[in-house]
Amino acid sequence: MLPDRPTKLVPPTLAKMAAWCVCLILVGVVVYFFALIIARLTFVALPVAVALLLTALLYPLTNSLRQAGMRPIYATWVTMLVALAVLAGTGWLVGARASEEFPNLVEQVQATARDVQEWLITGPLHLQQAQITAYVDEVATMVNTQRQAITTTVLSAGAVAFEVLASIVLLLFVTFFLLKDGDRIWSWVLKGFGGVAPRVDRAGRAAWTTLSHYVQGTVAVAAVHGVIMGIVLAGMGVPLWAPLAVLIFFASFIPIVGIFFAGTVATLVTLGAKGLVLALVFLGILIVEQQLENHVLQPLIVGRALNFHPLAIILVLAIGGILAGIAGAAVAVPVAAVIYRALPELRHQQPALPPPPSAHEQGEPASEPGPDRAAAPEADERSADTE
């Protein structure tokens, strides 16, 4: 009777809530320490995460080359060379356009600044030249004050250049071997799960399908977004339109936050180069195109794979950004989608196979006494109707 006395003193609802709280605390502790481990291994974890995303993007090409009869090693090399050629071509285009159009951008920004200064003097504000000069001097003083901080930041960036290069090398190696031996690596991993290997296999395949759909759909949507905005910028005659289009393309991989940042940069460049009217026109086109993307392209291409509410995406982005900055915000949505799709497969148990049919169900002669031979056809017809 003594062991039952404490349970009788606690209401059943409170006992259930206490049990749930204990489980949630344990899960939170595990997640916290796992996050600490990932934070300590950022040098390895981040390249591996990006390699998984690149593998999901490039694997259809590798698989097509394999199905065409090419050996896995050759198919992987061709895929990697094609990807590197695309990146190199994009970098050359951006660099060439930037070096060619940057002086023109400087001249246009200076002309815009003179126009703004003239409007401030002759316009409705009727500011004095001394006031404008004071404002410019304040901005210059602020820049000079922050020069030391900017210099320190540049030096720190130069100090981590070796780590970035090593991360890129690791990223390329991981991507190469995932493309070449991904199926063999997965089979080797499954051997460590024993009897639950079928569940883990189903969960892994569901997660990989979701990740592939997300990456391929996001690349397609980002490409459409970057091309449209690049055409708009080029049509307006904005300098650096190619680098801005590439920036919009890469920023589209970070939902909501990325396009806000890239759109702000493109709008400011348009404002400095072409003035307020064209900047407002570009901003309006950007907002309309973004709404079409959110309500048409995203649901059709990416939404089916994720099935996430916008509020869930915002919360996931906030958590990822707080935990790991820009990199965390970039991978937060696919990680959440993978977990969301994999957990049901881990919990779901595959139904058992039906038992083999008995001799009587197979229509074989029964060993025990039964109906006579004349009644057998009628019995078979009744059993057939029942089935």
Image (tube, rainbow, N blue to C red):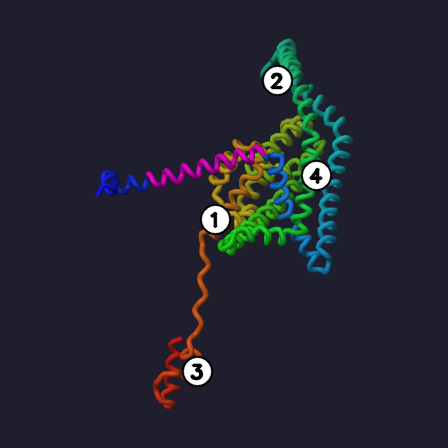
At horizontal 76% and vertical 37% (from top left) the residue drawn is 92
What percent of the width, then of the height, locates residue 60? Answer: 65, 53
Residue extent of the magenta highlight: 18-40
- Extreme bottom residue here? 374
Which secondary structure, mark 1? helix
Contact (Cβ within 8 Å) of mark 3 with mark 4: no
Q: Earlier in the sequence, mark 3 or mark 1?
A: 1
Image quarter where the N terminus lies is top left
Q: Using the image as rendered, state which of residue 216 and residue 154 is in the foreground.
A: 154
Where does the C terminus fall, quadrant-wise?
A: bottom left
What distance separates the C-alpha of mark 3 from that of mark 4?
67 Å
Amino acid type, residue under disc 3 in the picture: Glu
Q: Amino acid under label 4? A: Val
Query: Badge 4 is on which residue?
Result: 169
Residue 25: image location, x then y, percent: 40, 36
The image quarter in which residue 331 lies = top right
Q: Secondary structure under badge 4?
A: helix
Comparing labels 2 and 1, the label whose residue is closer to the camera: 1
- Residue 364 vertical position relative to residue 322 in the rendered view, above or below: below
Q: Are marks 2 and 3 in contact (CB under 8 Å)?
A: no
Q: Which x, y percent locates residue 359?
A: 42, 78
Q: Amino acid at mark 1?
A: Leu
Mark sitting on residue 364? 3
Marks 1 and 4, the one that precedes in the sequence:
4
- Identify the element where label 3 is drawn: loop
Q: Toward the viewer: 210 or 290?
A: 210
Residue occupied by mark 1: 343
Crowding near pointer 4: few (<14 within 10 Å), some, many (20+)? few
